[in-house]
Amino acid sequence: MNRIVASLGLRYAELAGGERFAAPVRARGQLGVRRLVDVPVFPQLPSRLSAAMGTELERNPQSEDAFHLNVWAPEGARDLPVLVYLHGGAWATGGGSAAWYDGSVLAARGIVVVTVNYRVGPLAHLQPDDTEVLHNRPVEDLLLALDWVQENISSYGGDPLEVTVAGHSAGGWYGHALSVHPAARGLLRRVAHLSMGTEPGRSPELARAITARVQELTGDASLQRVPLGELLAAGRAALAFDRPLGELPRSYLPAEGEFAAPDLFDPQVAAATCHADAVYIRTTADETGIFGFADPVDRAVTDAQVDRLAGEWGAPPPAGGTPYERLVSLTTWRHFSGFAVALAAAHAALGRPVQLERFEERSPLEGLGAAHCFDLPFQFGNRPLWGDAPMLRDVHPVRFAEVSAHWVTNLADFVSGHPVPKKSIPH
């Protein structure tokens, strides 16, 4: 196997005029670091999912100018297919420069791997400018990153005509939005949605109301001079509310507009407007276990409450299991797998190659199951880089290697444009 060459902290953009909330503009440069953990990510508070995923992300420095991407490629690579990975984090946390997303193992399958930082949280989604059209800065960031890939990836051994955008969770939301928007046509050939977030865009009225609340909490209408820590705290406080049973925690979301049309999650419309040649869609069996396993309200749910929710949502009541397990099954369908299956069917009806997968490996962490994010260490094949992740405790190394090998090959084959026969995971 060829040695994998990592190029870390490559700059693809900067803030126009250096102003907070500004549009991104092109920039070039490199940090010159040797460790992924030294590449800054965009400012954020600790993730609510750290009780399962651990705190590895908190080791990266934070910067409002963290427009960096990272590339892994086999030594001597030429014209290899490219995987551009868009991290998740509920639109509020995460970074492509987290050690979790080291692309070495995937690159060893004969592809070039790119991970990208894009703006998250209040710095990404507040709308302090009094304009009629609301911006979507993360999509603008990602378009510039994909432009960078088109112009530069051949220097790292990648083929700019063979780019797959693979997004997880909120990153899957952005990948989906890019795959149906004309602005990204020609920037990607294939798209992979991993546990894609399916929340609709925030209404302009609510987006402006959240911004006004942050301005009220900080006393600064422009929000330009508010110390970063104060801004992040106010940004979280502006979203505070009691989570209704069955709903996901409230987070920042892109506002409705050019890149978040009201029909973005209409499966027929999305399939008809998609400009990718092929689509890969994956969910986990127990997506919402990561939100409920440590929530006393979810853990105390009753069968009657689950049946009531199913009736309200027009879903068949989940069969079998404890009330909590039934709740996870129902909410997984509601927020993740229902749309995934419908979208796959819509693509197939149009004759577009579509690959629908389901990750079913269960975490030993009680109540978590085959949860949202539990697939990521297996996908990247880098168990040691997940440090203190509670969800991986007691996962046997041999079992980890077996499951990881399956999913690394599975995704790399899709990126390479190879027909992918159904293969079972060893048991």
Image (spheres, rainbow, N blue to C red):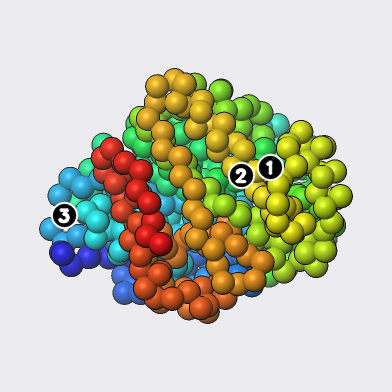
Give percent across and percent down for residue 247: 76, 49
> How much space separates mark 1 and mark 3, taking CA atoms?
42 Å
Q: Is residue 178 left or right of residue 36?
A: right
Identify the residue position indicated by label 2 in the image: 336
Q: Which mark is residue 334?
A: 1
Report crowding for label 2: few under 14, some 14 to 19, many 20 or more residues within 10 A (C-alpha). Answer: many
Q: Secondary structure at mark 2?
A: helix
> Tag 2: residue type?
Phe
Q: Nearer the viewer, residue 261 or 363?
A: 363
What residue is at 66 percent from the left and 28 percent from the top? 262
Label 2–label 1 contact, CB within 8 A: yes
What residue is at 31 percent from the left and 53 percent from the top? 409
Let me know if residue 241 appears in the view. no
> Tag 1: residue type?
Arg
Lower sequence index among marks 2 and 3: 3
Q: Is residue 264 left or right of residue 116?
A: right
Rendered image quadrant of residue 297: bottom right
